[in-house]
Image (cartoon, rainbow, N blue to C red):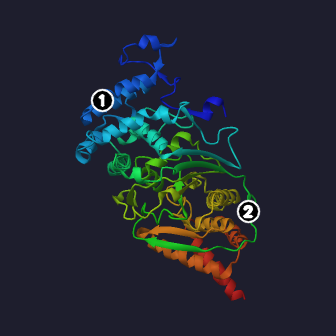
Amino acid sequence: MPAEAARYLLPCAESFKCFDRFSILDDASSLEDADGQVPFWPVFTTLLTSSIRTPTQLAELLDTIAVTLRDSSGPAGDYGLLKAYISASQPAFFDTLWRVIVELALDLPLHFSDGSIKVLGAEGEREGGSSILTLSRRQTACLVVHQFFCTLRAPTHREDFFDFSIWYASEQRHEYACRIYLNCLFTYLEEFLPDGSENSRDGSSSITYTLVTREPEYEALDLPPVSLGPIEIVVVDKYETSPEQLGLPSGAAVVAANRYIGFGQSATQEEVHVGSSPEACPAVLVTPPLGRNDVLVVRGAKAVLNITGQRRDIEVAAQEAEESADWGLRTMLFMDALELDVEDAEAGLPDLKPENLAREINKAYTAFSSGHYEVIWSPLWGCGAFGGDPFIKVVLLWCAASLAGTPLKILCDRSSRDLAASLDRMVRAVGQRRETARDLIRLLENMPRRIERLKTFDWMIETLEAEDEDV
């Protein structure tokens, strides 16, 4: 990795430069380099001395920053949603929260004295297959605030979805989701008010972002005869970002991630989990696209509000277990499934290609063995937009959890009740007739390649029950 890609430059760095397009600085000429650019930090700190008392003035400030750094407003557009949200939902914003946001923003050079942070996976920085970035809660909050101000530049590994400007424009693909994410952001920042809960949280606690890389151990699907571990199909009314469904206190939760992890403008499981947890958002700045053998593990990020449901059916509420939950124990396992919806199905069900089976087992095993977890909570990983077969995916997750020695809970909501019932029947049928992960993977290897998606359940049940008749 080139040296410039090994560190992510922050706005307080002397080499983070821009043109002073609006003549913000009185002495710009003394700061200009040979190209006419000046350090951005004095431009930013000067802008923050302005009196900001209305949503329109805030939008003008953000737009000045955007045009100064990027020549345009970008995805923030007219800032209509941000202005409307603050006007309607944050009446005391400029009397209370604004002061805290400015203070956190100006603290950036105090917490990052060299003006940069390392990019995960940078050359020479891996230890035992892991690359780790640990930040204090104040450091994390500084980065979150700069994602709010949109003072950050695109990392070398991605071009978009690295700051919160995507939530600001009037036109949104899912306006209500963006309003919820703004609610989560400001609720989080309220913790830094003088009487906020951040002051009562453990000052030594931190957020860790870990890129875990493991060379494939089961590339040839030659699994050891490890006994199948406990598995449960759990049906809930709605998905939640409540402590239990997130694996607290001593488990972990799978985040069904894209290769480019992070937040967004809709309400996929990943977007909901990250959008509800502002302390997870800086991960986009330092996490390269996940490779075949990579997973991202984020520990300690609080879900500040409980978002229930997914996609168009979402609501938000306060966390009922706020007082008892130890958010420092929360573990998010970002693992990207194969995008089987774009694979050619002419030769048969893509899920059953040996290389795909091996890839998914190794990906899940890397995540599940990244720590000591009493239980793993997982959605139907890779079975939505990515087109994976849920019965095959659950078998693969079960094998991976067994190899890692971790109990597994598969989470389904009420819209998937029928599917959950079939999964439960499959699990019971397997449990009665298969003892090891090796036995179970052999069942998939024997499945006809040209079988149709979702017909896999019937085939497995018929095959397992036929064995009884042969006895």
Image position of 416 with respect to 91: above or below: below
Image position of 220 with respect to 124: above or below: below
Q: Amino acid at mark 1?
A: Glu
Where does residue 205 sit, x and y in percent of width and height?
51, 51
- Left or right, 17 with reference to 172: right
Q: Are marks 2 and 1 in contact (CB under 8 Å)?
A: no
Visible residue check, residue 460: yes
Please state which of residues 35 and 81 is positioned toward the viewer in this rendering: 35
Give the class, few, some or many, for how many residues have Cα within 10 Å of label 2's Cα (few <14, many ≥20). some
Give the class, few, some or many, for how many residues have Cα within 10 Å of label 1's Cα (few <14, many ≥20). some
Which residue in the protein does label 2 denote? 221
Q: Amino acid at mark 2?
A: Leu
Q: Secondary structure at mark 2?
A: loop
- Left or right, 325 with reference to 451: left
Residue in the image at 41% along x and 70% along y: 414
Please state which of residues 314 and 368 is positioned toward the viewer in this rendering: 368
Please state which of residues 290 and 207 is positioned toward the viewer in this rendering: 207
Report the number of numbered marks. Answer: 2
Residue in the image at 69% along x and 59% along y: 358
Q: Secondary structure at mark 1?
A: helix
Residue in the image at 31% along x and 38% along y: 98
- For the residues marked 2 and 1, what is the alpha-carbon distance in whole angstroms? 57 Å
Where does residue 279 sit, x and y in percent of width and height?
46, 48
* Quarter that holds the N terminus: top right
Which residue in the protein does label 1 denote? 60
Where does residue 222 sit, x and y in percent of width and height?
76, 64
* Quarter that holds the C terminus: bottom right
Of marks 2 and 1, which one's residue comes earlier in the chain? 1
